[in-house]
Amino acid sequence: MLVGTRSADLRPTGRRAFGASIDAEQRIATLFVPACGAERLLANLQDNGHVAATFARPMDSRALQIKGRCMSVHESGVHERALQDRYYAAFSEALLLLGQQPKLLRRVRYFPSFAVTFRIESMFEQTPGPGAGRGVALGLP
Amino acid sequence: MIKLGELQRCFGGVLPAIISTCSADGIPNVTYLSQVFQAGERHVALSRQFFNKTSRNIVENPYANVELIDPLTLQIYELDLRFERSETDGELFDTMSTRIQAIASQTGMSGIFKLLSADVFEVLALHEIEGVLAPPGPDDDAGAELGPTSLRTELRALSVVTERLRRARDLEELFCLLLDALHGELGFSHTMLLLPDESAKRLYTVASRGYGDSGIGAEVGMGEGLIGTVAVSGKTLRMANLGGQLRYARASGRAADATSEPQKFPEIPLPGLPDAQSQLAIPLLAAGRLAGVLTVESRSSLGFDQWHETFLEVIGHQVASAIETMMLRAEAEETLAVARASLAPTPKPALEKRVLKLCFYRNDDCVFVGDEYLIRNVPGRILWKILRSYVDSARTDFSNRELRLDPGLGLPPVKDNLESRLILLRKRLEQKCPELKLLPKSRGQFRFETSCTLELVERDSA
């Protein structure tokens, strides 16, 4: 999963996120972005709050993108760590299949991280192909 | 200061990159990017296959941000880019297009996935993200996974392989020495060598390592899949993270087989690792003409590096020249040999009791031994000619020259690949019908031997 932001002069910045939670009823998403290298992303959020997040399923490349405005950013706490651990376990499993070394995978620092929470305002098809970018009805309660 | 050239592994496409763009009204967009191409020291190129949101944003606002991951070290790099131009032809476009065509063809998506343009961006800044990895622990061998192959080792291996190839006296020996050297010196344990057939519409496997005997004679159409695409484009393809795409294509093939009528004259399946993660295919070009395609597969996504590609291209040039030279020499020597040799029929050998039934189907030049498919096309016609001569007039000695001059075999007048066709025929006989032997006698001459009584039947079709 990915998070994209932009600066005041419309320069974009994107990072990988490791774990997310969605409150469908409230249309609120929280993504966890590793602290290392997150400076520009955090500055952009503080500046204008515009955020995009893409979720992709590796087995068939099915992907969706949601967009909205940032509500809050905080350093993720220990109680939020389990969710990130679960996501990273699945992520590293995929890398193991590609031949990556387990010792190296254990050294990846996805925590400490920042929890970026935003209100979902729109959703788009992101699966590769001619339909990518098409608006999708939110379909949330 | 990191340079783009130091990020070669990131450009291999093993791990997808990320691209972020922003519309003119300030809405960011972020998505995966299958591959980033280096286009000089300060530029990268991105493939545009559809005019999607990323493309629209670039038109409105030329700035983009790309995150790359080194698949070996997991180090992350961030590139700030500014769109410069779109290319729809030229070397860069062709290179990128070939790669996309190969994947499209392999997955049955030709004509759907195609390159619209190679979008070239200037790299405004390149940052290494610090702190991505925790420091290595006492049990971690931090540098072990990097282990760059030394130039000295590469040159030694190149020298050894070259020296071995020089020893080859004929095509069969050349193919054998090549694949053995690639295995022995470089550890390439899954290799194939394919040559174009007389029609120049298909390639057939004349030698392989690591796939058992199943692959000899396997065919692929020009332009089909990775190998066929390399043959048509004349460009090397180094593909990583093949797993998903190839599994999909092969699974589709299996599903189609399961639902369709069984083929009366089955094709030999192209050998390949069902779980291949990376593949390197090199066109063998001599004087601009395709002499063959050499392929190497690996179960690791990190199987092949830039130096493997360069190394095999150097070897490929030598092999292509050797194939051309040997074919021309064989033709010249055969002419000489025919002038000297007597082609008088030899006495018919005493017939053994065992009867071998062979059938030739005229509609597709296919030879069956018993109920089992043996060979078809030109090698099939050659075999049938030999068998007919043996049964009808007890001939056992044959020359390449007479085969070349026989219009019924359908060989082209020049560069007919006869030598390699005979190698293929000999190998198929060894595997599928060892009772029939084609034994080299002298340059351009061979003897047919069998201990069986042959019963030949010809049919229009099955």
Image (spheres, coloured by chain):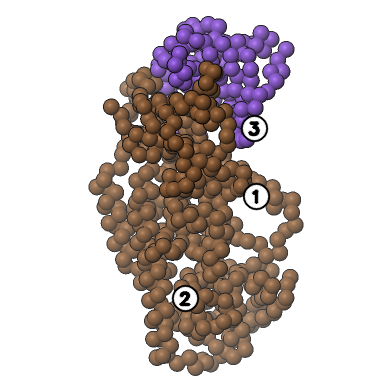
Label 1 amino acid?
Gly
Label 2 amino acid?
Val
**Residue positioned 31% across, 39% down in the render:** B148
Above or below, comparing residue A99 to residue B162 in the picture: above
Q: Position of residue B277 (x, y in %)?
A: 50, 42
The answer to whether any part of residue A44 appears in the image is: yes
The chain coloured brown in the image: B
Mark 1–mark 3 distance (CA, rounded to whole Å): 26 Å
Residue under circle 1?
B253
| Marker disc for residue B414 | 2
Quadrant of the rendered image containing residue B4:
top left
Callout 2: chain: B
Tag 2–tag 3 contact (CB < 8 Å): no
| Horizontal arrangement in the rendering, residue B439 relative to residue B75 (left or right) | right
Callout 3: chain: A
SS class, disc 3: loop
Relative to the observer, which residue lies in front, A135 or B169? A135
| Horizontal arrangement in the rendering, residue B247 relative to residue A139 (left or right) | left
Q: Nearer the viewer, mark 2 or mark 1?
A: 2
| Marker disc for residue A131 | 3
Q: Look at the image and tell me in which quarter the N terminus of chain B lies.
A: top left
Q: Position of residue A59 (x, y in %)?
A: 60, 33
Above or below, comparing residue B441 to residue B103 in the picture: below
Q: Colour of chain A?
A: purple
